[in-house]
């Protein structure tokens, strides 16, 4: 199941992966299937970023708690786009991207009360994982935890972008669909926190457990055909646990899917946990060491709950003397970064580089960009090897470049407060890189740093720029010449 890239002549501006153009829409988590979090904003230079301000005329209001990233869609020929926000109330809100006014809303059923679950930290539990848009069907796809008299259920919905109406044949109940295939899915103990993705006419939904690791859950990926919802495929960990719970969920590159799994329970031999796993579109099971990686101390990580599942794997591309090299970077709750060959993940202990890069757990979604032929990766976490003068940081940026094995160093560290996930903007795919991050559950301000040096160039200023209701791991998006940050009950817009 090795990747089969046909390599053409590539230039440095294409590295590490493609950026998300603001005109193309923000169709999925961090802007693209690779989860780069790299957005092209032609007017947002380093200098103009210093004048960023909260747009007081934008009235993006709704009800409900929000953990999912907002996504953006503009229909062909339309003068205005829409922002879509999914809440834990099991409601999807479509808002005008210019004014914030509501276009439509759709309720998908009663959310699940925390009291009806064995554990967890979200109450109520509804839509948590970031939805995905499919332009070919003009629909948004998402998973909702729905409360019925018989208990909680996970259902995958497809809603028309025009008015929020459910498409024919939807929703798909995950438990029922897998039971028909002879598989057991425990909807009460499973949670759906990771972002969805679409590849070749299939929407893929990752599942893990609840906070507290209670009950009988596994790491699952469930695939549902976008035009034929009766076509359902699946993959799961062999051992109990091994949840796929990172906010970035599933990343995709080269026509393949990549997930990171969490800690398993009672496994004496490796059974799918503490791993980066490559999946083919049909989700068939592979034991080939080219298709998975696990650290050599995976059992110790299991025992410490120091798993790889806190961030999504991120595909990277760096220049070499012979062209380019395709890599996967995984970041662990043990503070280590694992650099992998994208086409041969290496099996147990098979990383190209394993290095401690953070003095604390890494749990949020990384973002990547390129400077020259090197890949840069920003993540929320205290850097273990910050260059001077940094002494305390909660934002760390790695530089990955050519070498045998590839060189990985800490480029810079930034000081701020919170547990948000970063993104990056450039003006043309490589110029004026800026790393943005929101101080979720911290100072609740928006921060911007020069991507090359780490110089702070924006910090949300007055009291009217302190956001409220930001949930941990929350990220932002860049489109329509604004930066959008979602919180409980409100979508904030920053203009320049």
Image (tube, rainbow, N blue to C red):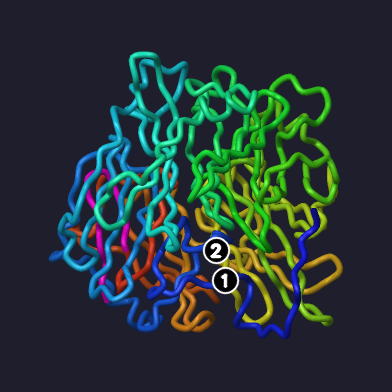
Where's residue 412, x and y in %? 58, 67
Highlighted range, magenta: 484-496
Q: Position of residue 129 (x, y in %)?
A: 44, 43
Q: Is residue 348 above or below residue 378?
A: above
Dot 1: few (<14), some (14–19), or many (≥20) neighbours within 10 Å?
many
- Secondary structure beneath dot 1 equals strand
Taking depth in this image into account, of 332 and 493 the one nearest to the observer is 493
The structure residue drawn at horizontal position 63% and vertical position 50%, both measured from the top left corner, is: 358
The span from disc 1 to disc 2 (Cα, nearest Å) is 7 Å
Judging by the rendered image, the residue that carries numbered circle 2 is 36
Q: Earlier in the sequence, mark 1 or mark 2?
A: 2
Is there any visible trace of residue 418 in the rendered image?
no
- Indicate the quadrant where residue 485 lies: bottom left
Residue 200, position as x, y percentages in the image: 58, 58
Reply yes or no: does residue 487 show up in magenta: yes
Estimate the x, y position of residue 289 in percent, counting from the top left: 85, 46
The answer to whether 158 appears left or right of 227 in the picture is: left
Tally the numbered discs.
2
Disc number placed over residue 251 in the picture, else none: none
Residue found 84% across the figure and 65% down from its top: 405
Q: Which residue is mark 1?
A: 369
Which of the two residues, 264 or 464, is positioned nearer the viewer here? 264
> Is 273 on the left or on the right of 360, as rendered?
right
Disc 2 on helix, strand or loop? loop
Secondary structure of the magenta portion, mostly? strand
Quadrant of the image for the C terminus? bottom left
Q: Residue furthest left?
A: 57
Residue located 68% across and 79% down the image: 373
Q: Are marks 1 and 2 in contact (CB under 8 Å)?
A: yes
């Amino acid at each position: 199941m090795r990747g089969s890239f046909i390599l053409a002549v590539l230039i440095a501006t294409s590295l590490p992966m493609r950026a998300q153009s603001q005109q193309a829409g923000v169709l999925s988590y961090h802007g693209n299937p690779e989860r780069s979090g790299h957005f092209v904003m032609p007017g947002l230079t380093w200098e103009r970023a210093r004048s960023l301000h909260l747009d007081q005329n934008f009235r993006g209001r709704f009800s409900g708690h929000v953990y999912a990233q907002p996504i953006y869609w503009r229909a062909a020929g339309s003068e205005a786009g829409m922002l879509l926000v999914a809440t834990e109330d099991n409601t999807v809100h479509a808002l005008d991207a210019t004014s914030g006014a509501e276009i439509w809303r759709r309720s998908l059923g009663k959310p699940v009360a925390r009291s009806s679950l064995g554990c967890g930290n979200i109450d109520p539990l509804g839509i948590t994982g970031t939805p995905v848009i499919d332009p070919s069907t003009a629909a948004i796809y998402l998973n909702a935890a729905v409360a019925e008299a018989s208990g909680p259920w996970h259902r995958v919905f497809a809603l028309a972008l025009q008015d929020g109406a459910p498409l024919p044949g939807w929703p798909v109940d995950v438990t029922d669909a897998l039971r028909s295939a002879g598989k057991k899915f425990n909807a009460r103990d499973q949670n759906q926190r990771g972002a969805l993705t679409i590849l070749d006419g299939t929407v893929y939904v990752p599942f893990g457990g609840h906070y507290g690791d209670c009950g009988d859950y596994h790491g699952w990926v469930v695939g549902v055909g976008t035009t034929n919802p009766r076509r359902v495929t699946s993959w799961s960990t062999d051992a109990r646990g091994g949840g796929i719970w990172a906010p970035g969920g599933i990343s995709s590159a080269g026509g393949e899917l990549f997930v990171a799994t969490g800690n398993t329970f009672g496994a004496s031999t490796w059974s799918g946990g503490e791993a980066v796993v490559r999946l083919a579109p049909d989700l068939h099971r592979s034991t080939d060491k080219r298709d998975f990686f696990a650290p050599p101390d995976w059992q110790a990580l299991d025992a410490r709950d120091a798993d790889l599942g806190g961030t999504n794997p991120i595909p990277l591309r760096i220049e070499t003397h012979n062209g380019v090299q395709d890599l996967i970077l995984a970041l662990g709750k043990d503070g280590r970064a694992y650099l992998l060959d994208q086409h041969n993940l290496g099996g147990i202990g098979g990383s190209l580089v394993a290095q401690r890069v953070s003095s604390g757990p890494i749990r949020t979604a990384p973002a990547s960009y390129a400077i020259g032929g090197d890949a840069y990766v920003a993540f929320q976490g205290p850097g273990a090897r910050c260059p001077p003068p940094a002494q305390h940081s909660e934002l760390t940026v790695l530089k990955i470049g050519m070498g045998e094995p590839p060189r990985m160093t800490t480029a810079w560290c930034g000081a701020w407060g919170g547990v948000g996930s970063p993104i990056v903007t450039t003006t043309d795919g490589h110029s004026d890189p800026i790393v943005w991050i929101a101080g979720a559950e911290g100072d609740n301000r928006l921060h911007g740093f020069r991507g090359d040096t780490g110089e702070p160039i924006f910090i949300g200023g007055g009291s009217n720029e302190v956001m409220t209701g930001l949930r941990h791991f929350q990220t932002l998006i860049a489109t329509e010449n604004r930066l959008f940050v979602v919180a409980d009950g409100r979508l904030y817009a920053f203009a320049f």
